[in-house]
Image: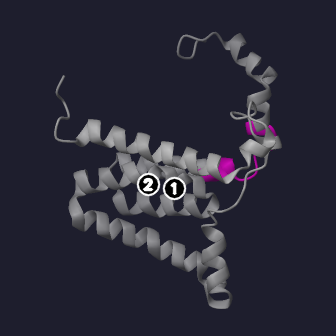
Amino acid sequence: RRAGGVPAWALALLCLSKRAHSLYMLRLFNDGVAMLLAHLALLLLMRNRWRAGLFFFSAAVSVKMNVLLMAPPLLLLLLKAGGLRTAAEAIGVAAALQLALGAPFLMRHPVAYISKSFELGRVFMWKWSVNLKFLPEDTFVSQPVAAGLLALHLALLGLFAWRRWGPMAGEG
């Protein structure tokens, strides 16, 4: 059978991909569980089950924080579809789960728990990089490159938001 116009035998070629092997075999620790919970959350959200969806979204975040990348558009959907009250209730459910799961750690070492949960100053290892392997290691781990990538990312998000929802959205 064909999936999206790709013959089944072509999927076997993915096994030969160094990138696919690196991402899905060498680093597949908790990604599967996080994505299972995130997709369950999306299924519930598509059925307008906001509180249940945010519960499972929060559970996915507790497994792996990269799920938080879905939070900005999720907030927009919550506000547009359900309004401020629905958004506040659903976010309250998500926050309650985070507090319940973090309670044992928050009771004993609250500062360490919070500071390490959002450790933005950490440096990623060059040897595990796939997309930026062309950079020399000293450049890859430098603070200016990290700050520049973050600034570029935020600028592109801002540009997208401005073009999509700004005063001139829909023109041209």
User: Looking at the picture, which amino acid does disc 1 mark?
Assistant: Leu
Q: Which residues are magenta?
A: 23-34
User: In x, y percent, where is residue 167?
Assistant: 16, 41
The answer to whether 125 appears left or right of 162 in the picture is: right
Residue occupied by mark 2:
71
Is 60 rendered above or below residue 171? Answer: below
Residue under the image location 45 percent in, 72 percent down: 95
User: In x, y percent, where is residue 40?
Assistant: 50, 50
**Res 139 quadrant in image:** top right
Q: Are marks 2 and 1 in contact (CB under 8 Å)?
A: yes
Residue under the image location 53 percent in, 16 percent down: 4
How many neighbours does mark 2 have within 10 angstroms: few (below 14), some (14-19), or many (20 or more)? few
Q: Quadrant of the N terminus?
A: top right
Mark 2 and mark 1: span between their CA atoms? 5 Å
Residue under the image location 30 percent in, 55 percent down: 78
Q: Secondary structure at mark 2?
A: helix
User: In x, y percent, where is residue 47?
Assistant: 34, 48
- In the image, is residue 79 part of the stretch drawn in magenta? no
Q: Is residue 48 visible?
A: no
Q: Is residue 169 visible?
A: yes
Residue under the image location 50 percent in, 63 percent down: 58
- In the image, is residue 28 part of the stretch drawn in magenta? yes
- Residue toward you, 34 or 1: 34
The answer to whether 23 appears left or right of 62 in the picture is: right
The dot on residue 68 is: 1
